[in-house]
Image (cartoon, grey):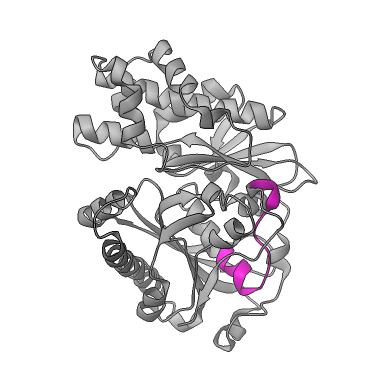
């Protein structure tokens, strides 16, 4: 398995307190709360000078209902947004800090031995076409609570260079899975995104549309459950081919060429309700089955358009644990689809791992922005450092 150039660098920016760990690899923490807003994933990893990261511990903390409601509300304009956003960011930082302390407690590692935390924050607005993206976070508070340097705000530098600021994970996917035959890596979070890996070429990537964001919203509305566990409710319904085609045909964004990215700004309950207006008497379970197939089909359409030569697809993210969705994917993709676990990299912790890796890239002053993915004017060092 090829190695990323970043894994062969010695740190230029790490503090002296970590110098004794360079021979065995430096320790980093990655934190991720994604579009689904169901919780915070955290990993403590050792990044050696050679080879793959070693995961020392992982933790998943549920998102408190009140905080989730605040974050969801902040995805749209409302009263007193500035104060509400600041309070939600502080609450999220405290949840991040809980994850950090759990990781340290579980491993017996001292905060002084961790080079940095990579904390993405919670995306509440993503409008690169208007020159901005907002990830709620309070990295200074997190650095204070954790006693560890924090790298945050990974998207803004790429957006400032004219890029989409997303997806961010393709260079990490390339470091883990590049080389050999052409293949794709599919992350199924709230939004689905693809990394396209061709031997000898820079990685490419794009968002393909909704993964779990619409499935979760519809499931919660009709069953009271936060998500459709293993796709069981969808399996009780039947795909409506006409509704599926109507969903695809009604959204111009799906037809745009890359680079492109999206989020709850577009794919939300308002989007779904508008398109279901003519189908209001449809069995809710049939709608769920159709939404699940919609996720699979839009991924397959995007892959066929961008990289028809891809021999296989490696799947990660929360959606990879949905057996019914994986079956729909296999059918739509018409090529092998398997989880990244089979390649030795946890599908559950993939995004948290990526942000630990991106923190290392920032600390070392290495460019992690990929213009072939985001459309930026050039590669950039991503993130901002908040010292402990």
Residue 370 lies in magenta, yes or no?
A: yes
**Residue 125 coordinates in the image, percent (x, y):** 42, 51
Name the spot of residue 78 as percent of width and height, x first. Answer: 27, 52
The segment highlighted magenta reads 358-373
Tell which of 155 and 68 is nearer to you.
155
Q: Does the magenta segment cover residue 302?
A: no
The answer to whether 114 appears left or right of 97 in the picture is right
Give the left or right position of residue 180, taking residue 296 as reference: right
Furthest toward the bottom, the residue is 16
Q: In the image, what residue occupies the spot 61% across and 85% down?
A: 19
**Residue at the spot 33% in from the left edge and 26% down from the top edge:** 274
Q: Quadrant of the C terminus?
A: bottom left
The reply, left or right, for residue 95 in relation to residue 209 is left
From where the camera sits, is residue 283 visible? yes
Residue 305: image x %, image y %?
Answer: 65, 27
Residue depicted at x 34% and y 49%: 75
- Please determine whether, in this image, residue 106 is positioned above or below residue 281: below
């Amino acid at each position: 398995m090829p190695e990323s150039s970043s894994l062969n660098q010695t740190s230029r920016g790490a503090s002296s307190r970590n110098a004794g760990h360079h021979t065995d690899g430096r320790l980093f923490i990655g934190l991720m709360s994604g579009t689904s807003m169901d919780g915070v994933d955290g990993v403590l990893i050792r990044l050696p000078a050679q080879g793959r990261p070693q995961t020392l511990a992982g933790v998943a903390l549920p998102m408190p209902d009140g905080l989730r409601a605040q974050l969801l509300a902040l995805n749209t304009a409302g009263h007193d947004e500035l104060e509400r956003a600041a309070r939600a960011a502080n609450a999220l930082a405290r949840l991040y800090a809980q994850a950090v302390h759990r990781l340290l407690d579980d491993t017996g590692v001292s905060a002084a031995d961790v080079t940095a935390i990579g904390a993405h924050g919670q995306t509440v607005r993503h409008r690169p076409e208007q020159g901005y993206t907002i990830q709620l976070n309070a990295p200074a508070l997190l650095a204070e609570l954790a006693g560890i340097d924090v790298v945050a705000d990974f998207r803004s530098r790429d957006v400032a260079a004219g890029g989409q600021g997303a997806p961010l994970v393709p260079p990490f996917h390339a470091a883990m899975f590049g080389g050999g035959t052409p293949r794709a890596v599919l992350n199924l979070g709230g939004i689905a995104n693809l990394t396209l890996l061709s031997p000898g070429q820079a990685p490419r990537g794009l968002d393909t549309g909704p993964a779990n964001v619409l499935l979760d919203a519809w499931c919660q509305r009709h069953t009271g459950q936060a998500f459709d566990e293993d796709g069981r409710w969808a399996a009780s319904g039947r795909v409506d081919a006409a509704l599926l085609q109507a969903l695809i045909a009604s959204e111009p964004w799906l037809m745009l060429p890359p680079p492109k990215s999206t989020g709850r700004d577009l794919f939300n309950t308002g989007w779904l309700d508008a398109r279901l207006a003519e189908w209001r008497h449809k069995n809710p379970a049939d709608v769920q089955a159709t939404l699940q197939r919609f996720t699979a089909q839009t991924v397959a359409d995007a892959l066929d358009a961008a990289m028809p030569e891809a021999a296989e697809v490696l799947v990660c993210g929360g959606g990879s644990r949905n057996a019914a969705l994986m079956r729909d994917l296999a059918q739509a993709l018409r090529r092998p689809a398997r989880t990244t676990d089979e390649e030795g990299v946890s599908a559950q912790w993939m995004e948290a791992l990526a942000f630990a890796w991106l923190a290392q890239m920032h600390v070392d002053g290495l460019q992690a922005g990929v213009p072939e993915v985001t459309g930026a004017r050039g590669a950039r060092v991503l993130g901002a450092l908040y010292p402990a």
